[in-house]
Amino acid sequence: MRDRFLLLCLICTSSATMADPVPVILDTDIGNDVDDVLALAVLHSLETRQVCQLKAVTITKDHPQCAAFVDAVNTFYGRGDIPIGVCSSGVTPEISRFTPLADIKDGGQPRYPHDLQSGKTAATAVNILRKTLAECPDNSAVVCQVGFSTNLADLLKSESDTISPLSGTELVRRKVKLLSIMAGAFQPINGRTHLEYNVVKDVPSAQLLVKKWPGRIVFSGFEIGLAATYPAASIDRDYEYVDHHPVKEAYYLYEPPPHNRPTWDLTSVLYAAYPDAGYFSTSSPGTVTVLPSGETRFEAENDGLHTYLRMTDAQKLRVTEALVQLSSQPPD
């Protein structure tokens, strides 16, 4: 296992590892699909490799168990002190298929120990976002949004406060160098325009985000994660180094294998960590517009702040291999 780990470190090494770890905020609707759990595991592996530092997790699924589950996963990876913020939007308030893992006990003891027992006692996402960004060096932070745009739209609307004299928009302009999001669709799916879940669940916030975000946004559209699926064989094989693994158990609870799950959210994280490693190509610059239906339209513009990911068949193989190795890497 140790030799395998060292080999995989070499596979994913890039120039990013030669610099200070990039501060990353994960904004996620974890609890809906299981790809969010895999994306969180990838970020922990990237922190182990000193590529990124996961500074905070903010949640856009409005159910209190989601925060407890995130804290349980973070604690499993040895980082139970990562700040977690929640929303009160009413968007997808139903219980998850897999977040009840946070409450499971074996012999009277938590299977996955954690301190934060409920989102009801967590800080608000906007406060966590503002505090985290205020503490980051200028033009250093990367935000990965792999859920709805609720929290980031609320951040943009926030005013100066005791956390920072800057408004939310000013904080983003000063502190964030990239917003990498899994949202929208930029290629037809089966010949039809696809209305992507993360957008349609909160269209007004998505519209505000693409219109008002003052910096670069790179979109991983629905078609990217759909093309690079996570192999069920890895779920059965690569997480056996412990008796209970939250990624494997969440995957099974969401939909039992054999099935290869699309890697939607993982692709945004991979690009954020390794933008220059050739895992993906990008479109020309332009501007994305979100229609009332939730459709995302892209118009090329030389001075546009938006691009979207593209992926060849050869890149798909590299992306899938990298995501398998990063997702299944053991904790430190």
Image (cartoon, grey):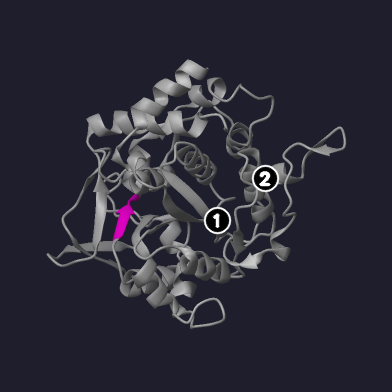
Tell me what residue is drawn at x 69 percent, y 54 percent: 65
| Position in image of residue 85 (x %, y %) | 60, 62
Q: Is the residue 44 above or below the residue 83 in the image?
A: above
Q: Which mark is residue 212?
A: none
Inspect the image, locate mark 1, and give the three-letter code of the amino acid beneath it. Answer: Val
Inspect the image, locate mark 2, and give the three-letter code of the amino acid beneath it. Answer: Ala
Q: Secondary structure at mark 1?
A: strand
Main structural element of the magenta stretch: helix, strand or loop? strand
Quadrant of the rendered image containing residue 83: bottom right
Quadrant of the rendered image containing residue 276: top left
- Quadrant where the C terminus sits is top right
Q: Is the residue 35 above or below the residue 214 in the image?
A: above
The segment highlighted magenta reads 217-221
Mark 1: few, some, or many residues within 10 Å (few <14, many ≥20)?
many
Q: Residue 70 magenta-drawn? A: no
**Residue at image mark 2:** 72
| Residue that sits furthest to the right in the current view | 108
**Residue at image mark 1:** 57
Is residue 294 or residue 119 the one in the foreground?
Answer: 119
Is residue 114 or residue 233 the one in the foreground?
Answer: 114
